[in-house]
Image: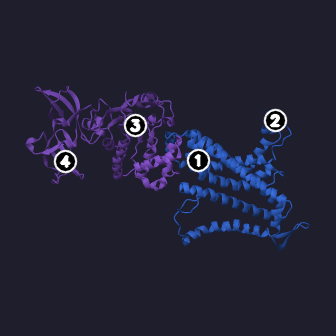
């Protein structure tokens, strides 16, 4: 029996179904991300767990008990909102204290817990300030402290970092995760930022148009995306659409005007493969799996992003910056990769999608 | 923290150029000619003596009229009634208007537009028409009296029109839109998620209203109630038509002095005292509430 189980959760507004029978099992203490493009139903799912939206179908069970039919106030879940939703007319201390007041905790005990919680989020010196006097990151921490002080069985984060600038967002990712580890609260975070989801989560649920297409550990999800949509949405991928044929006892993948030898036992017919740019190496001719001509080279600081025209089509290659000279457009290069880097994914036609990869 | 008023947002100091002054000139002249000069003349008039035998304004100046109006029980009653009326109307509009604004605000957009127009309707109708409508409703064989008699709550001879509470009811109807509008503006400034946050922390809907919504709409309540107080203390048409001779307030008393008794100096005295009363109450109340709000909301 898992800690939180979501069974066949659906939501329709009239004829429009925004969520189609979502199933999720989450273990105690896990940090889960609901990741997907806008309109994929991730926020709707979170709002249904919190109790702000009633599902059309399905069940949400926390430690075996259904949450449905209970108003948000009785679910006792901690929630951090995208806008932080701090009470602007209350000081930081009063904001954090609010949940304890609602539970009738004595004044002395409240004061003790609030100072403890202020220390946890490193706001010890700001307790008597009003939210308007705090920076974005500090407000974020107040919102987190306010949600955690009621010791919720579940912490819900709705795009918690999307209002912060890039540098601060990165710092808060680390901090948020370390606080979560300290208190050990099972957490569900909604985000559209795949970096954030990969960096922070124990497991990521990838949603596409109201369905969970994948629920897995971040590295599994990245290395073996499994679907065209996942390969394209998570990170950068060269997506190769082609056909698997049998030529003289050898399976070959025909794509564009070229072909690749395959080791794997895959059925013949149309297929799509994903190849991550950082898994491709630029090598000298004899070792190359494939040859091509450089058509572009973009400097990204930590790496070069090289665009190579090959027989298979245009491929993006990521080359770590170790002080090499830039590859000039027009140069002939050899490409090579380990066989495991080439991943078969369910093609776009099997899972209809409007997203098409940059590698086509 | 700046000490600017809650009612006027903080702004960058404005540099007056000669062109700006030129543009301001027509408005200034209008105010000087139609407001400042008549006010000064009223103030001056209130100091003159009056010969009741000949109905002449005397050239002598003294504080005699103030002495008379302030210490005569007849005028004291009128001023106390005016104050009571304004307070009752203010309390009534706030008690009705604040929840009403919130309820309408939380409605679906379509109903919201409909009910908002319905509540603002009193502002769109001429004061005289609105008041006459009420006098038909409240008259002895009007619908309100008939219903109450039928229910056995009052007997057939009771007079609803020309009573203090009738004036209060009609003024509340006329002025409640002002409270709703100013509370509405404050409601729009509240992050709707903060109500959800309070719910998720274990607050019931009433607690959310009391602890989250109400403190944040206080500036709107303050400005709405100040407008209501000032307008009901100086209201003329409603007390005159609904209250009649029996419910005399400061504004109708001043009118009677000017046009019936022809004692202009006493009429002017009443007008000046009404203005001072208004300024005093608004100033003291405004400052008290404003200080509280400023500390909390930083506005």
| Residue ID at (82%, 37%) | B154
| Residue ID at (66%, 44%) | B96
Does residue A61 sit above or below B200 in this rendering? above
Q: Are marks 4 and 3 on the same chain?
A: yes
Q: Are marks 3 and 2 on the same chain?
A: no
What whole-number distance in Å separates the C-alpha atoms at marks 4 and 2? 93 Å
Disc number at residue A291?
none
Badge 2 density bin: few <14, some 14–19, many ≥20, Cα 10 Å: some
Disc number at residue A319?
4
Task: Say left or right for A292 vs B169.
Answer: left
Q: Nearer the viewer, residue A100 or B180?
A: A100
Task: Say left or right for A300 vs A54.
Answer: left
- Say what secondary structure mark 4 lies in: strand
Q: Are marks 1 and 4 on the same chain?
A: no
What whole-number distance in Å separates the C-alpha atoms at marks 1 and 2? 39 Å
> Residue B114, position in %: x, y?
61, 41
What whole-number distance in Å separates the C-alpha atoms at marks 1 and 3? 32 Å
Q: Which residue is mark 2?
A: B149
Q: Which chain is blue?
A: B
> Residue A78, position in %: x, y?
45, 40
Task: Say left or right for A224 vs A8.
Answer: left
Disc number at residue A42?
3
Q: Which colour is chain A painted?
A: purple
Q: Is residue A80 visible?
A: no
The chain letter for the residue carrying disc 2 is B
For the residues bearing labels 4 and 3, Cβ distance under 8 angstroms: no
Q: Which residue is mark 1?
A: B214
């Amino acid at each position: 029996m898992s800690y939180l189980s979501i069974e066949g959760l659906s939501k329709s507004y009239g004829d429009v179904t925004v969520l189609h029978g979502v199933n999720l099992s989450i273990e105690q203490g896990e940090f889960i991300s609901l990741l997907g493009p806008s309109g994929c139903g991730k926020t709707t799912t979170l709002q249904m767990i919190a109790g702000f939206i009633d599902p059309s179908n399905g069940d949400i069970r926390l430690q075996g008990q259904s949450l449905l039919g209970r108003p948000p106030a009785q679910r006792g879940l901690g929630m951090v909102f995208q806008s932080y939703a701090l009470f602007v007319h209350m000081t930081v201390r009063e904001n954090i204290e609010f949940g304890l007041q609602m539970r009738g905790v004595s004044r002395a005990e409240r004061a003790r817990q609030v100072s403890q919680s202020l220390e946890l989020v490193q706001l010890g010196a700001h307790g008597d300030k009003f939210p308007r006097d705090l920076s974005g990151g500090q407000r974020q921490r107040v919102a987190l402290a306010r949600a955690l002080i009621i010791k919720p069985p579940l912490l819900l984060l709705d795009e918690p970092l999307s209002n912060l600038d890039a540098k601060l967002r990165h710092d808060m990712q680390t901090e948020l995760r370390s606080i979560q580890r300290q208190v050990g609260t099972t957490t569900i975070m909604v985000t559209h930022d795949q970096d954030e989801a990969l960096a922070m989560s124990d497991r990521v649920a990838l949603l596409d148009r109201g369905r969970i297409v994948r629920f897995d550990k971040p590295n599994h999800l990245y290395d073996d995306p499994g679907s065209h949509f996942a390969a394209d949405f998570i990170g950068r991928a060269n997506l190769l659409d082609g056909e698997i044929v049998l030529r003289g006892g050898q399976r070959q993948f025909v794509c564009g005007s070229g072909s690749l030898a395959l080791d794997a036992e895959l059925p013949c017919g149309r297929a799509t493969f994903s190849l991550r740019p950082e898994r491709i190496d630029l090598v000298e001719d004899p070792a190359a799996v494939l040859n091509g001509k450089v058509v572009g080279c973009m400097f990204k600081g930590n790496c070069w992003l090289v665009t190579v025209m090959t027989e298979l089509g245009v491929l993006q290659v990521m080359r770590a910056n170790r002080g090499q000279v830039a590859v000039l457009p027009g140069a002939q290069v050899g490409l090579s990769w380990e066989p495991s880097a080439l991943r078969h994914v369910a093609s776009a036609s099997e899972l209809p999608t409007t997203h098409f990869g940059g590698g086509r | 923290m700046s000490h600017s008023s809650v009612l006027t947002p903080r702004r960058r100091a404005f540099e007056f150029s000669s062109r700006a002054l030129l543009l301001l000139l027509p408005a200034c002249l209008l105010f000087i000619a139609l407001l400042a000069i008549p006010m000064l003349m009223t103030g001056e008039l209130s100091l003159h003596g009056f010969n009741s035998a000949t109905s002449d304004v005397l050239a002598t100046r003294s504080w005699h009229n103030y002495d008379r109006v302030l210490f005569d029980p007849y005028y004291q009653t009128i001023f106390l009634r005016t104050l009571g009326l304004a307070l009752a109307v203010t309390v009534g509009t706030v008690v009705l208007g604040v929840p009403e604004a919130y309820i309408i605000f939380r409605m679906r957009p379509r109903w919201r537009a409909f009910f908002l127009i319905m509540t603002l309707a009193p502002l769109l109708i001429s004061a005289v028409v609105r008041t006459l409508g009420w006098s038909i409703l409240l008259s002895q064989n009007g619908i309100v009296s008939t219903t109450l008699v039928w229910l056995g709550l009052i007997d057939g001879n009771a007079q609803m029109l020309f009573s203090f509470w009738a004036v209060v009811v009609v003024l509340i109807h006329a002025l409640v839109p002002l409270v709703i509008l100013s509370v509405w503006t404050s409601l729009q400034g509240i992050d709707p998620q903060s109500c959800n946050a309070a719910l998720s922390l274990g607050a019931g809907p009433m607690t959310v209203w009391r602890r989250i919504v109400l403190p944040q709409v206080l500036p709107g309540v303050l400005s709405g109630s100040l407008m209501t107080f000032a307008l009901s203390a100086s209201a003329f048409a409603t007390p005159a038509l609904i209250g009649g001779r029996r419910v005399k307030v400061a504004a109708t008393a001043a009118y009677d002095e000017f046009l019936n008794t022809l004692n202009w100096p006493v009429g002017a005295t009443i007008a000046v005292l009404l203005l001072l009363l208004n300024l005093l109450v608004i100033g003291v109340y405004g400052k008290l509430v404003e200080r509280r709000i400023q500390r909390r909301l930083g506005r």
